Image (cartoon, rainbow, N blue to C red):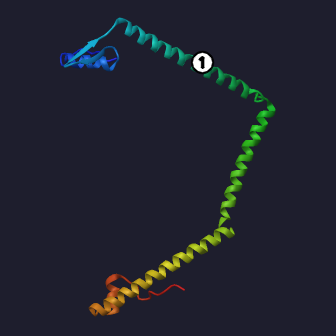
Amino acid sequence: MKYVHSASMSVKEILQSLVDDGMVDTDRIGTSNYFWAFPSKALHARKRKLGELESQLAESNQKKEALQKSIEKSKIGREDTAERAALIEELATLRQKKEQLKAEIDKYRECDPDVIEEMRQTNKVAKEAANRWTDNIFAIKSWAKRKFGFEESRIDKGFGIPEDLDYID
């Protein structure tokens, strides 16, 4: 609760703060604002808050008990024994071996028929795009020759186009 008294706070601000915190009631009657507070209101507010907190405490205690029961239940069959320790060690070894085998499979991924087919499709799309751009370059060179009368070698040199530029088979 923010009931800091300072010289800069006006009575109106203090009252508004008390109203916001539910400590004081207000009503507008005609052109006047009336403020009031009954001692029993604060008592009821504290009792209500106490009830809420007790309810939360009871709920939290129930959750705690349920979690403790769950922990006890999960411990059954997990007692530290030599057999369990050996099984855990074997599990760790098998997981490590699985990772090694997975890494080895990834090495040979490039031989996978699905991967090869995917690469062929990607290459086909890239080839079509390269030929489309080559066609665009030839069209622009042709237009520049007609429009401005430039020689083809001058266009190639000016735009950094290699002399052996051609379609991909």
Residue 134 position by quadrant: bottom left
Whether residue 110 is situated above or below residue 30 in the rendered picture: below
Q: Say which of 152 and 52 sits in front.
A: 52
Q: Say which of 51 and 107 sits in front.
A: 51
Residue 102 position by quadrant: bottom right
Q: Which residue does the numbered mark 1 point to in the structure image?
A: 61
Q: Quadrant of the N terminus?
A: top left
User: Residue at position x 34%, y 18% from top?
Assistant: 21
| Residue at the limit of the structure toward the top, as seen here | 39
User: Residue at position x 18%, y 16% from top?
Assistant: 7
Q: Residues within 10 Å of mark 1 (few under 14, many from 20)?
A: few
- Left or right of 139, for residue 147: left
Q: Quadrant of the C terminus?
A: bottom right
The spot of residue 51 in percent (x, y) is 50, 13
User: Residue at position x 44%, y 86% from top?
Assistant: 165
| Residue at the limit of the structure toward the right, as seen here | 83
In terms of secondary structure, where does tag 1 sit? helix
Answer whether residue 62 is visible to the viewer in this image: yes
- Disc 1 marks which amino acid? Asn
User: Residue at position x 56%, y 77% from top?
Assistant: 124
